[in-house]
Image (cartoon, helix red, strand yellow):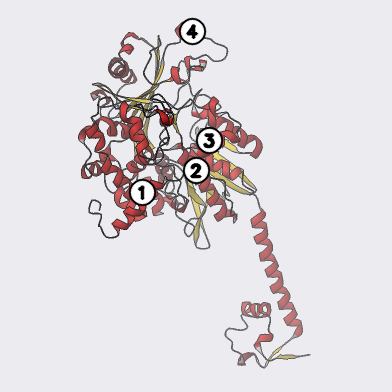
Amino acid sequence: MKLTLYPVTLLSVTTLSALLQLGDVKSFSISSFQKIPFSTTSLAAERSKAVEWQQKQKMEHQNDSERKRKYVCIGGGWGGWGAAKALCESDVDCDVILIDALPDPTGATPYLSKTGKPVEAGTRGFWKDYPNINALCDQLNLDQNDIFTPFTNSSFYSPDGLEATAPVFSEAKLPFPIPSFLNLGGDAEFPQLPSPFGQILATFPLFERIPLKDRASMIGLLLATIDCLGGDENVQEQYDRMTAHDLFIKFGLSKRMVDDFIRPTLLVGLFKPPEELSALVVMELLYYYALAHQDSFDVRWIKNGTVSDSLILPLSNLLQEEHGLEVLGGCRVGEISLETINDKFSAKSITYTKGNEEFTIDNVDGIVLALGCKGMKSVVDSSKDLANIPTFSKAASLKGIDVISTRIWFDKKVPTRTPANVFAKFEALRGSGGTFFMLDQLQEDNPSLWGEVDGTTVDEESRGSVVACDFYNAGAVMSMSDEDIIKILTEELLPSAVPLFRDATVVDSWVGKYEGTVSWFSPGSYQYRPPLEGAGNDVLPNIKCAGDWVRMGDKEHGAKGLCQERAYVSGIQAADSLLASSAGKSTKSEVLEVREDEEQFKQGVAVNNKIMEVLPRFWVR
């Protein structure tokens, strides 16, 4: 039997698709189909093939969406752990691997000096506006009062003596009496005032040597900060190309204010002097000090042990025990290999070495590069596929900052005005920034400070002060011997700041040197910093980036600069983005924002933006 079809609309889409695939019809029109004879047997067979092909495609897609995936987080800092947490806790069926060069990135194995005392690479503070790290403590059932010290003051010392004290704004006292009908005495708690008025009044009595006129010279810088942070990305890139030093000159900051307070603050806050820092990042730091909220710059420290054993260890235990996280410590990542799928690159394997052996992780579905600039350079240099993508080669070109950490045990307790302290303007620093933390004051109930582990005890009289001293921008100190570094600290810097150190004797010491490990926000670096999205979903959808130096784009968070909160949040956001691009899951982990800008800052931004519509920014390029 023959069947003649007339209107082309009677042909099913499936039949037409089958005919075109067979190559029997190369071009067509309505008239060409009006008198074409078809065998019903042939037609049924081709329709069956087309339906079978469609079902196979549907099954493959379904199998792909349901199959177990494999994700790798490279880097065991806050960014890597944030990413691992978000991946493990997602509703995607997946294996998650965290890999790091540290022998034990979980914090389970303490990092000890040669004499068995606990040490740590740097002393890190936790600021008031760290909502996500605070929420992590709550999730892990950690009492924040057990993990952190109270918020503390910080003192700034120069060869001339005490220069200034940074207050605890949330606990500040009024510097002068006010009318009794307000029910506040001279020693009453400081009221929460609009920024920057609250900060100005709270610090008024605490700048011991810096004249009022020098402090007042910062007003112009506050206006520049409103203009920069209230502008769009193009405006911020213009400020990024300027050094902070140039910005200070153009906006009239006094030399004394810069040299005695701002320079040492930047050296210990961003680890570089103003002439080597992006004006953009400096103003992000200044915003928290003077324009965010009165108490945004309040800082606290770890109360017992280290960041690793206090926070990372309970997190890693949770992820390993409840979610099957695999942690590979003591491993150095080598090549990340890519393949091409549907005109896009895709990460497929990772090689790494442990000891003298090389291993490969195959069939990778996604990667979070939670690396600093030094780690990024190492991986990109080993990965020719990544090196050919400008996003990664540009990130690998950025340089890091040298840091030295020390720990010194004395034979007696040395009282100090504050437990956290900053060195300023000392020739012995050789251009670096310096801090010293009285750990015996911050962690007075932590016997392990003196090496009391595994049942060993140290009598009370032998528990002298334990001081953590750190050098930032330490290139000129790195070549010195460990003994000479300790000598500079104990014979010059510490006694100059606190004379009672002259009567204390060193019992033990440790020095750790870390070359190029900390992010350097140099002028013009913004465009080189890796985006959280990596090369983007149109180029390489299954590699994302995390860390305090990443550009977060539309996922930007209120925590800025060298900031543990920012690194942690970026890891969470990178994982969410990776799940969306690799598994088609629009997972959105809960990320808490910092407090909203105060109303006067918002109004200042609005007014400034109106003015800038007619006034050119002649002070930027």
Mark nearest the camera among 1 and 4 is 1
Extreme residue toward the right, this view: 1
How far apart marks 3 and 1 lie (CA) works out to 26 Å
Instruction: Kindly identify which residue carries mark 3.
Output: 134
Callout 3 crowding tier (Cα within 10 Å): few <14, some 14–19, many ≥20 = some
Q: Which mark is residue 229?
A: 1
Q: Is residue 23 above or below residue 501?
A: below
The reply to whether discs 4 and 3 touch (Cβ–Cβ < 8 Å) is no
What kind of element bears circle 3?
A: helix
Relative to 262, 554 lies left or right: right
Q: Is residue 122 visible?
A: no
Give the x, y percent position of residue 251. 23, 44
Q: Earlier in the sequence, mark 1 or mark 4?
A: 1
What kind of element bears circle 2?
A: helix
Give the x, y percent position of residue 511. 38, 22
How far apart marks 2 and 3 lie (CA) works out to 12 Å
Give the x, y percent position of residue 462. 45, 7
The reply to whether discs 3 and 1 touch (Cβ–Cβ < 8 Å) is no
